[in-house]
Amino acid sequence: HGSSTWSTRQAPPASTSLASLSAATSDRAPAAQSHKAARRAYARASSSQLIISNKSTKLEPIPVVGYDSEEIGEYYDRRPLEVGWRLNSLSLPLLGWYIGLLLDNFWGVDTREDVQKMRGAQLRMHLVRSGSVALVKSGQALSLRPDLLKNKIWADELGKLVDAVGSFSDVEAMDIMRKELSDLLPRLKGVAPVKNTRTSQKKGRLSKLEKMVRDDPILSLFEFFNDNQAIASASIGQVYKARIRRGAQLEAALGKAEAERWGGKIVAIKVQRPDAAASASLDMYLIRRAAEWLSKFRGGGLPAIADQFGIQLFGELNYIREANNGERFRELYGDWPDVVVPESSFALTRKKVLVQEWIDGEKGPWLGDDGIDMVRIGLRCSVDQLLNTGLFHADPHRGNLLKTKDGKLAVIDFGMMADVAEEDRYGLIGLSIGIQNKDLPLITENLLKLGFLEDTTQIDELIPRLRTAVRAATGGTGKASDINFSSLQAELDAISRENVLKFKTPPFFTVIIRSLTILEGFALSVDPNFRLVRGAYPYVLRQLLSPDREERTPESLRLLLIRLLTVDGKEQEIEWAR
C-alpha cells in the first residue's frame, strides 16, 4: 500500500498501511462508520495468525482421459435393452420406496422415529444395490444437507454411504492389486519373500485369501490388517489398511531410496471396483441424455454441466491422477500448521490401485468448539483455493475430512478435483460484488466474461431477477453475509427452468458451488446459525489487502481491487465507504 497509489506488491505492517491509506483519503468525507468498520475488519484479519498459500504447485495436472460423451452415446444407443434394464433397476426400487412413504402418511405413522429410520435405511440400501456411482455420490452429498432433505434421520443413514457402500470380494480385490502391480514381477525374480508372521503363527488350514497373500510376490510386500479384509468401502473402490514390509524384496521392487522411505509405513490401499468404469459410463449416458432432453424445455447449459460432472467422475477412475492431485494439494497446504495431507507412493500406485500414507482421525460432524475449529480451517482452505491456487477440492464430504488427535484437519481423498482458471475465479468475485453494490457495468462485464450470458440483449431483465435470487438466498435480508449456497443454487436453477432468459450456468461454477455447498452443510451441522460468507470474511479481507511480500498479486485480482476499492477506479485514492 502506498500513500498515493494502490500497489499490492508489498505490504507493510498494518499500522503503517492504515495510516497511509487514511492520509490518502483525508480530503474525502465518507461516513465515519464505514471508515471504522473497514479499519476494524482489516485489523482483525491482519492480527490473526493465519497462513495463506501464495505459491503454486510445481506438478502439472494429469488430464482426464476416457470420457467422451459422443462415443458413450453411440455405444449405448446400440444397446437399448441394457439401458432399459438399468433404468428399471434404478427407478423401480425408488418408486416402491416412495409408495411406502405415501402409505406411511396415509396410515399416520410417518412421524414415528422407528418408521423414519426404516425408510432411511431402505433408501440407503436402494442406492447401494443400484451399483450406480452417480446415485451413491448424490446420496453422500445429500447426507450433509439435512436442511434440504428435511429429515435428519435420513441424512444420518445416507451418511453411512461415505465408507459403507458394500464391499466386493477380497479375493477379487487382491487379484486386481497383483495384476495392476505385475510390472514389478521381473524385479522380484530370485528374491525370497518376507515371511508373514501373522499367517505362519496361525493354526489350522489357511483360507484362499490368506494363501494368496502369503504366496504372491506382489501381495507379500504388504502386511494387511483386519485379516486381509477391507476396512471401508466407497462408491469407486474399497480400502485396505496395511504395513509395507521392509527387506530385500521391497528394495528389489522399488529401489533402495524408495524402500527406505516407505518400508515400515502404515498405508491405506484403495482398490477400484471391477465394474466401476462400466457403471460410470452407463450412468453418464443416462445423465447426458436426460440433460439433452431437459435442455429442450429450459435453459442453463445442462449438457455442458453434465459433461463437467462426467469429466470429474472419470477423473476419479484413474488413481494415478488422484495421487498427482494429492501431491499437488500437499505442496500447497501440507505445510499449514493445522492441515494434514497424506503422501502418496507413486512407486506402488497404478490406475486401479492407490497406496497412500495412513491417517488416523475422526470423521465429522464434530460437536462443540472442536467442530467450529475444523469448519474454520476448512473454510480458510476453501477461501485460499478460490483466491489463490484455483486447485479446487470438489468433494469435501465427511468421509474425506478427518479431525486428527492433535486437532488438525486431514484431507484424505483427491479424486474429485478441478482446476479453476484465475480469470473465472476473480470474475465470479467481481460478479458477486457487482450484484451486492448494484454496479451495472461490473455485473454486465462479468456475466459476459464468465459465460452466463452470450450478449447484453436481456441484461435489463436478468439483473432484477438475479437480485431477487440473491434476496431469496439470503432469507430476505439481501446481505451477502447471510447467503445460503444451496438456496442460491436452487434460485439460479429456477431461472434456468423458466427458459425465458438466455441464461446458462458455466461448468466451472457448478464445481465451486458444489464444494461450498458441501462445506456449508458441514458448518450447519456444527452450528445452525453459521453463515459461510460471514465466517470467511476475515480470511478474504486479509488475503486481498495483505498478500505475501514475496509474491505478486495476480493481475486479474489487482485490476478487480483497483476497480472496486479506489475512487472512480483511478488507482489514486481508497474508496473507504465501499
Image (spheres, helix red, strand yellow):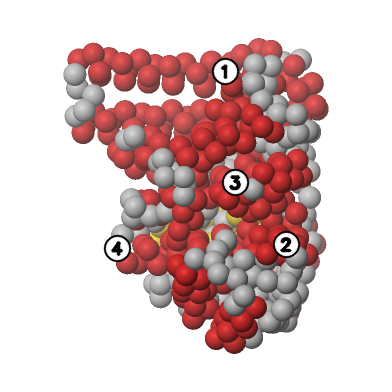
Q: Quadrant of residue 215?
A: bottom right
Residue under pointer 2: 569
Q: Which mark is residue 87?
A: 1
Q: Amino acid at mark 4?
A: Gly
Image vertical order of residue 169 relative to residue 293, above or below:
below
Crowd rating for badge 1 (residues with CA inside 10 Å; few <14, some 14–19, many 20+): few
Residue under pointer 4: 368
* Mark 2 vs mark 1: in front: 2
Q: Nearer the viewer, residue 124 or 460?
A: 460
Q: At 34% across and 55% down in the image, what residue appears?
A: 526
Name the spot of residue 224 as percent of width and height, x first: 51, 61
The answer to whether residue 136 is visible is no
Image vertical order of residue 440 relative to residue 61, above or below:
above
Figure disc tally: 4
Find the distance from the CA under tag 4 to the CA under tag 3: 39 Å
Q: Nearer the viewer, residue 186 or 470?
A: 470
| SS category of the residue bearing label 3 | loop
Q: Quadrant of residue 132?
A: top right
Q: Amino acid at mark 1?
A: Leu
Find the distance from the CA under tag 4 to the CA under tag 1: 44 Å
Q: At 53% across and 50% down in the image, what residue appears?
A: 516
Residue under pointer 3: 438
Query: Do tag 2 and tag 1 residues touch (Cβ < 8 Å)?
Result: no
Query: Do tag 4 and tag 1 residues touch (Cβ < 8 Å)?
Result: no
Q: Nearer the viewer, residue 438 or 11?
A: 438
Find the distance from the CA under tag 2 to the CA under tag 1: 56 Å
